[in-house]
Image: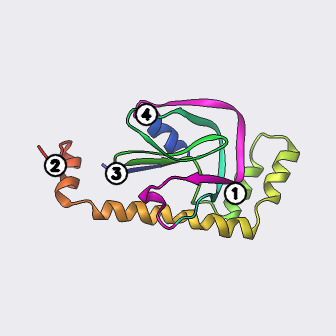
Amino acid sequence: MPVLGVCFGHQVLADALGGTVEDMGSYEIGYRDVELGDDPLFAGVESPATVFTTHSDAVTELPPEAEQIAENDYGVHGFRVGNAVGVQFHPEYDPATAREVASGKDLPDERIERVLEGITETNYAAACEAKALFENFVGSVREQPADEASAARAGETADD
C-alpha cells in the first residue's frame, strides 16, 4: 500500500519498518537546503531543495531494504521502501505556520529570532518547489494498476 510520511510520520514509518529513530541532541529548525536523490517523488524539484525543517529526533538507521533519497548535514531527510516513502522536512508549511511553530519552540530567544528572520517570501517561494512531491506521490498512486492496489488492500501480492 502506498504510504507517505512527513516529519513525525517519516520517523514512525522508519521505526515501523525496522529502522532506528533517535534524539539528535540538537534541533534543526528553519529553511534549510536538502540534497535530493534521483527519486520519482522529487520529479521536477531542483537539488538542493530549500525546505522548512523542525525536528529534534532523526532517522539514524534506515529500515532494511530502504533507499535513502534525501539528506543534509543533519542526516536522513528522505527514504523509500517500495511504495512507502518518508520525508523529514515540511513541504506543507506556509510562512504563517512556520512562524507559529518556530515561536512556540523551547529554544533560546536568539535562535528563535534567527529562524523568524529567515521566514521570508524569498525562502518560502523557493520552498514551494518541494510541494511538487505531493502531486508526484498522488500521481504514482493513481498510476498503480488496479489489480496491484486491490491485492495490496487484501494483503496479497499481484503475483499470488
Colouring convention used in this rendered image of the protein: rainbow
Height in image: 159 above or below 33? above
Please give the residue where the numbered disc 4 appears in the rendered image: 63
Spatial CA distance of label 1 from label 4 is 29 Å
Please give the residue where the numbered disc 2 appears in the rendered image: 158
Counting residues from the N terminus, which is met first, the one under dot 1 or under dot 2?
Answer: 1
Circles 2 and 3 in contact, beta carbons < 8 Å: no
Q: Secondary structure at mark 3?
A: loop
Residue span colored magenta: 15-44
Residue farthest along the left direction in this orientation? 160
Looking at the image, which residue is at 50% across and 66% down?
A: 132
Please indicate whether residue 126 sits to the left or right of residue 119 in the image.
Answer: left
Please give the residue where the numbered disc 3 appears in the rendered image: 2
Mark 4 crowd level (few <14, some 14–19, many ≥20, 10 Å Cα): many
Q: Position of residue 61 (x, y in %)?
A: 51, 31
Please give the residue where the numbered disc 1 appears in the rendered image: 98
Front-most of 74 and 57? 74
Q: Position of residue 14 (x, y in %)?
A: 46, 37
Foreground disc of the pair 4, 3: 4
Q: Amino acid at mark 1?
A: Ala
Counting residues from the N terminus, which is met first, the one under dot 4 or under dot 3?
Answer: 3
Q: Secondary structure at mark 1?
A: helix
Spatial CA distance of label 4 from label 3 is 16 Å
Front-most of 129 and 156? 129
Please indicate whether residue 119 sits to the left or right of residue 44 in the image.
Answer: right
